[in-house]
Amino acid sequence: EPQSEPEASDALRQQLDRIEHFHASFQQQVFDMQQELVQEGEGELWLLQPGKFRYVMHTPEPILFVGDGITLWFYNELLEQVTLFDATTELQRTPFALLMSDDRALWQDYRIESTGQGYRIMALDLSSPVQQLELIFSGDVLSEMQVQDLNGQFSVFRFDQINTDLDAFTLEHFQFVPPADVDVDDQR
Amino acid sequence: CSIKPSPEQPILSASDRLQRLNQLDEYQLTASLGIRSPDESVSGSLHWQQQQGDYQARMTNFLGIRVFSLDKADDVITLTMQGEDYQAANVSQLMFALTGWNLPVDDMPLWLKGVAGSNATAAEYDHLGRLIAFQLQEHDGMQWHIHYQEFFNDTLALPRRIEVQSDDIRIRLVIRNWQL
């Protein structure tokens, strides 16, 4: 098994540790295997060490995905459905949680290479839905994330950082209380 | 034209509407699709493009990852899932074998537009004569119950919210727009 360049995974680790908290709006574009644009979206992302994230998609459909490091809540407003996941078992499928995780052991499941502008993170498990992640930084600021799946379809998130001070990142910000009439599907 | 929820318009008579729905074999739709089974829950955007008997369908999750794609051309259906292409006589059965969930694919081009095919039984209609529910048995013997909860309020009243259920699989579709 090709091992990560040790320096690359350490460097990535330090780079991510420097992201204490992060808030940005994003534009998303999804391209299929023929590089055809198949979907566009936009929304907002909050990240907070350790393990917390809040992902709000406005288009193409209203989605809220939040995690407090213990539980993940995936709320699809149109479907009136919220799915609860156990954070530790779902990390593989959720790059945002992976980025903010302080579980060093997790990184053994990935091969990491440094690229000129950031890092390429490749899943060693060839059946993992997220096959490859590419992170691009401008300075210490995350500016782009590319997610590639098993079929070679890939999704590009371009981030515009919003300067929000730390006290706006409350714990409730990373939790979700489902509205009354919503179906709760607890997959934990 | 692209159909989105629009103000109240005169509805066709039930028979005229059904005739137009039956003739409708060229359409595109984008929907929010949620599939719940005992061991997995997936959701994402479904894009469906129908041309006569053929269709191309793609389900993409919020991250942009393809959950599956389904292409029917001259009676051959190709399912792409988990990075592999499959051609099978019974796609629904294959999907179930691969993931533990599936969709009633055989008659999907019909039930998506609110029409019950020849495999449908126990059809129910609303006061406007629109089909609102029926039972469906697929070739693999799986029994499904299809329920139309909401229609677009325009002349053709195409489905907007569809609930599809078998013993332990529950599918919810909210169609965001139709393009005819």
Image: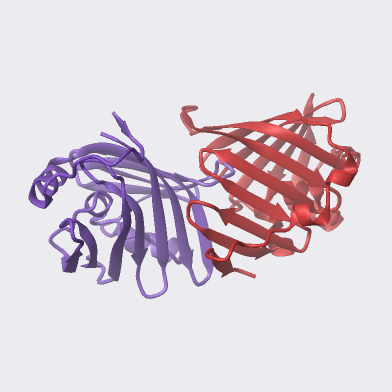
Chain colours: A red, B purple
Which quadrant, please, contains the C terminus of chain A?
bottom right
Instruction: Tell me: B79 left or right of A27.
Output: left
Question: As displayed, is residue B69 above or below residue B40?
Answer: above
Give the image quarter of residue A179.
bottom right
Residue at the bottom extreme, as displayed: B167
Regarding residue A5, the answer to whether it shows in the image is no
Regarding residue A77, the answer to whether it shows in the image is yes
Instruction: Tell me: B114 left or right of A112.
Output: left
Question: As displayed, is residue A174 above or below residue B178?
Answer: below
Residue A137 point in image, percent of width and height: 80, 28
Residue A124 point in image, percent of width and height: 69, 50
Instruction: Tell me: B49 left or right of B13.
Output: right
Give the image quarter of residue B133.
bottom left
Q: In this figure, what is the number of numbered marks?
A: 0
Residue B63 point in image, percent of width and height: 59, 43
Residue at image position (68%, 45%) is A55
